[in-house]
Image (cartoon, rainbow, N blue to C red):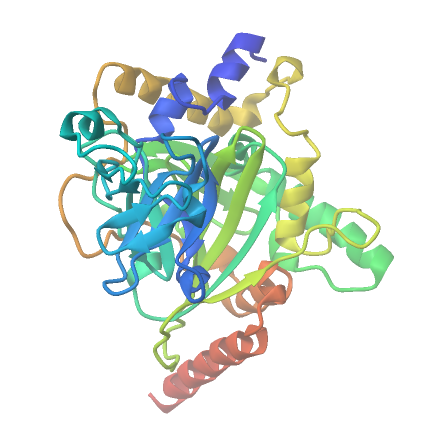
Amino acid sequence: MLTVEQNEELTRIGPGTPMGELLRRYWYPIAFEQDFDTVPSKTVRLLSENWTLFKTPKSGKYGIVLEQCPHRSASLTYGVVHEDGIRCGYHGWKWDFDGNCLEQPAEADNQNFRDRVKQKAGKAQVMGGMVWVYVGPDPAPELPRFDVFVEDGIRDVGHSTLPCSWLQIMENSVDPHHVEWLHGYYFEFLGQTQGFDAPKSFQKKHLKVGFEEMEWGILKRRVQEGGTEENDDWKVGHPLVFPFYMRVGGAGIDQMQIRVPIDETTTWKLFYSLHHPEGGAWEAQDRPEVYEYQWRDEQGRFITDYIEGQDIMAWVSQGAITDRTQEHLGRSDAGVAMLRKMFKENMKKVAKGEDPIGTIREKHDVIPLPCERDKFGAEREFAAAFINMGSMRYSPIKQQLLDLHEDAWARREKAGADA
């Protein structure tokens, strides 16, 4: 268990806090491109601060500044967007993409006064149909172009806002034993009581788990009942990508689970999926299909008859911020202990002026991540279960995805038969 002070160090993310300063060294997705199809700006909240995210009318360039104007604190979200920045609607003070004051219409043309007034600003870019922002100190690192966001395939993105700390979601990512219980034993119980077939691939007992530090965070491995260390789940594994992603995959589906820390007690939780089964055929997308998944029913109860709904129940029912002074970690929680150590080590790096783990300074086209392909040794079953019994059941293109994977499977079977 942790002390109150240790728990606060891990969970407080505002400006000037150790964790807040660490998290401000990374890029975050904070909106979708289509959010700006009808409006030029919107308020977004990130790392316990409110920001105005805007898009210029002609060039389509994105910018981000703190929402409150430094003049009289009016919201810049209701300002006028120009090609060179945004003008406050209250008194017309104009700010460029770096937070410099360009104009103060009601003031004398006093360059010295303008230079002394600065607005906090960040950087914004588009990747994979989402708008990503960096709100830390210069020089900004490169936006990591992980494979799921930039490679070819059919994409859909499920999202919802959850009333809990991003950290307890991340700790779940290095807790493999919950799979056989929450998604196996409990899922089977629900299936028996509610009359549906729970996916069998999650019910296998974990015989061995392992964790190792890697370039991007922590690589998680497992051997399940009936498997060996030659299976992908151990031989390849899948990574927790520090500090707010988890990468999973298998059966022609690669998914990045994204946990955006809105503030201490709120997380924007996204499931960004890339469908590219071997032998499959698809048309190029302009943007990913976006949908909101549901996690509470009309009575306010958790919806637990799908995989991610079960996870959400476990995360949110811990409370807005888990009281880690009351926990009792065992040997099976080795991954959680490793993650907390990694956070502490990287907070110290940032305090010394060093780059934390996963900082990218070189331009690049794509970053491939290690990830299992043969998921639980049941590829065909896994693909259908992942779509039907996961957050993708809420996707408006669910049937198209099922057809894509089944058609790809049939093509491979036919090719094998003809060989």
**How many marks do you count on the picture?**
0
- What residue is at 41 percent from the left and 43 percent from the top? 76
In the image, is 23 to the left or to the right of 203?
left
Give how far across and how far down residue 125 sits, in percent.
28, 52
Q: Quadrant of residue 412?
A: bottom left
* Front residue of 376 and 53: 53
In the image, is 149 to the left or to the right of 159?
left
In the image, is 223 to the left or to the right of 362?
right
Give how far across and how far down residue 408 sits, in percent.
44, 80
In the image, is 402 to the left or to the right of 31?
right
Q: Tell me: residue 232, above or below residue 10.
A: below
- What residue is at 57 percent from the left and 63 percent from the top? 392
Q: Quadrant of residue 325?
A: top right
Q: Tell me: residue 283, above or below residue 231.
A: below
Give how far across and how far down residue 57 sits, in percent.
30, 63
- What residue is at 31 percent from the left and 40 percent from the top? 93
Residue 149: tell me if it is visible.
yes
Q: Tell me: residue 118, above or below residue 196.
A: above
Residue 231: tell me if it is visible.
no
Q: Tell me: residue 221, above or below residue 153.
A: above
Q: Quadrant of residue 373?
A: bottom left
* Front residue of 166 and 56: 56
Q: Point out the image quarter for the N terminus.
A: top right
* Front residue of 111 and 331: 111
